[in-house]
Amino acid sequence: MPDIKALTLLTSQVRRDILRMVHKVNSGHPGGSLGCTEFFVVLYKVIMNHKKEFNMDGVGEDLFFLSNGHISPVFYSVLARTGYFEVEELSTFRLINSRLQGHPTTYEGLPGVRIASGSLGQGMSVAIGAAQTKKLNNDSSLIYSLHGDGELQEGQNWEAIMYAAGNKIDNLIATVDLNGQQIDGATDDVLPMGNIKEKFEAFGWVVVEINEGNNIEAIIEGMNLAKSKTNQQKPVCVLLKTIMGNGVDFMMHTHAWHGKAPNDEQLAIGLAQNEETLGDY
């Protein structure tokens, strides 16, 4: 059984990392990062079979692709706290010549990063390509990806979603962060997408819903269920219902903190709400 207490302590520390990283350079995307903290912790600590000795090929291990790359703070923090690189490097977030840019890139060679994701809407296509490569190489490992709900407003996603079902890409688990917020407001106000579950099912996918996307135990249960649905001739979609800015009360349930850094006072409030459990970098 996973150690829920240890996962909870890590979650609190990752939230502190996110707040401090974004505050230091007065730039970044804390809202979505905070909302996906539990997901990343569970993915890397419980769900995925992955190696800390990183190489781009990823033969014999599960691979993860972050499509909505602006939530890089949570990605970097969990990679560091999982041992991919030194935690102290988090202090270089968004600095010139840093490997930790605002959107993950590959040319700096940061361990754990396999896709540059500055433009939204492309991660699904990359994940499908990686999944097909696994099949061709007789590699039974799985491909995981994460996408924003607002990101699904872009058309390339739906071409890829059709392709995945049509080609029976059944070693792929694509998770959609359903926080209902994007940079300009609520997703339903910017461009309503209707019932996303019904859309994926109509396109031939198996859909698993995690209604408590900030609950560690619910995520573990839901992601394990998703894994049990793989290798059955259909791709799998996980709909993860999260709260934007979760863990910092004044950042929650609003798009205002999609891409806005806290000032000194706000940082202090946010840190006070998230215990230092593993040591700040």
Image: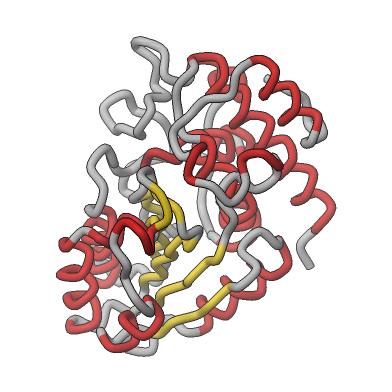
Q: Nearer the viewer, residue 149 or 129?
A: 149
Residue drawn at x 26%, y 37% is 118
Residue drawn at x 51%, y 34% is 73
Name the spot of residue 211 as percent of width and height, x first: 61, 73
Name the spot of residue 120 as percent of width and height, x first: 26, 48
Residue drawn at x 52%, y 25% is 261
The N terminus appears in which quarter of the rendering?
A: bottom right
Q: Nearer the viewer, residue 208 or 235?
A: 208
Left or right for 44, reference 124: right
Vertical position of residue 80 compared to residue 140: above or below: above
Q: Quadrant of residue 17?
A: top right
The C terminus appears in which quarter of the rendering?
A: top right
Q: Quadrant of residue 217?
A: bottom right
Name the spot of residue 214 as percent of width and height, x first: 66, 59
Q: Nearer the viewer, residue 201 or 250?
A: 250
Q: Quadrant of residue 152?
A: bottom left
Left or right for 45, reference 195: right
Q: Give the colouring mode of the picture.
A: secondary structure
Q: Is residue 277 visible?
A: no
Vertical position of residue 24 compared to residue 125: above or below: above
Residue drawn at x 26%, y 61% is 153
Vertical position of residue 130 compared to residue 172: above or below: above
Vertical position of residue 232 compared to residue 164: above or below: below
Q: Residue furthest top?
A: 96
Name the spot of residue 140 as percent of width and height, x first: 39, 72
Count of marks, rendered view:
0
Q: Is residue 204 visible?
A: yes
